[in-house]
């Protein structure tokens, strides 16, 4: 059964446009250093799962496009790279601590701003909208996924 996820990225680091320009429009979702977010990728994400590509920590945060998980989780190589800001001295190749998945662009959309999402009663339970939520990866319920798609539909915008 397909699952749905919201995955946050700072557009200065990786934007929906970067994903669109990437070879095969696919990028590894590297740099996650939160155990719960890692566990979502490692234990729950499967190829074909839907992704709301969300721009965060920017002037206007919100959903910027749709993507899909296109492979099983595997060790994030940045944890072993001493030059990377994501280097983890406790990680070893025999016992990696951090995993990631590859995501593939489905469609760049117009931005669905966070402020508009907050106004939608059907999105009231969405994890990203909960006070204090800072996770970079959160599950999205099927009804929430459908509501976001409806808000992104061309006739609405």
Image (tube, grey):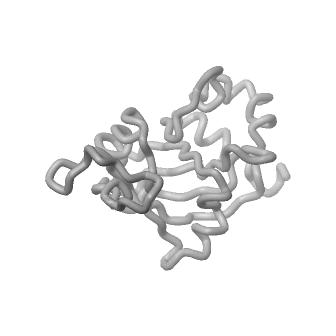
Q: Position of residue 105 (x, y in %)?
A: 55, 65
Residue at 38% across, 56% down: 101
Q: Position of residue 125 (x, y in %)?
A: 61, 23
- Residue farthest bottom in this picture: 23
Q: Say above or below: 138 vs 155.
A: above
Residue at 42% across, 62% down: 83
Count the marks.
Answer: 0
Residue at 61% across, 32% down: 128
Q: Where on the picture, by quarter, is residue 117?
A: top right
Residue at 53% across, 40% down: 136
Q: Position of residue 93 (x, y in %)?
A: 19, 56
- Residue farthest left in this picture: 94
Depth order, front residue of 117/134: 134
Q: Is residue 94 left or right of residue 3?
A: left
Q: Say above or below: 129 vs 111.
A: above
Q: Say above or below: 16 vs 126.
A: below
Q: Say above or below: 142 vs 85.
A: above
Depth order, front residue of 11/106: 11
Depth order, front residue of 71/77: 77
Depth order, front residue of 57/116: 57
Q: Quadrant of the N terminus?
A: top left
Q: Is residue 115 left or right of residue 128?
A: right
Q: Position of residue 104 (x, y in %)?
A: 49, 65
């Amino acid at each position: 059964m397909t699952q749905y996820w919201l995955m946050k990225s700072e557009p200065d680091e990786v934007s929906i446009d970067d994903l669109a320009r990437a070879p095969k429009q696919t990028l590894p979702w590297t740099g996650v250093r939160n155990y719960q977010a890692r566990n979502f990728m490692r234990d729950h994400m499967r190829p074909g799962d839907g992704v709301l590509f969300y721009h965060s920590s920017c002037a206007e945060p919100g959903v910027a496009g749709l993507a899909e998980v296109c492979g099983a989780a595997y060790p994030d190589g940045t944890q072993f790279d001493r030059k990377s800001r994501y280097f983890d001295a406790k990680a070893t190749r025999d016992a990696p601590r951090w995993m990631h998945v590859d995501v593939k662009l489905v469609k760049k959309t117009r931005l669905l701003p966070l402020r508009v999402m907050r106004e939608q009663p059907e999105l009231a339970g969405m994890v990203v909208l909960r006070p204090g939520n800072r996770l970079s990866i959160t599950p999205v319920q099927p009804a929430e996924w459908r509501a976001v798609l409806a808000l992104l539909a061309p006739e609405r915008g």
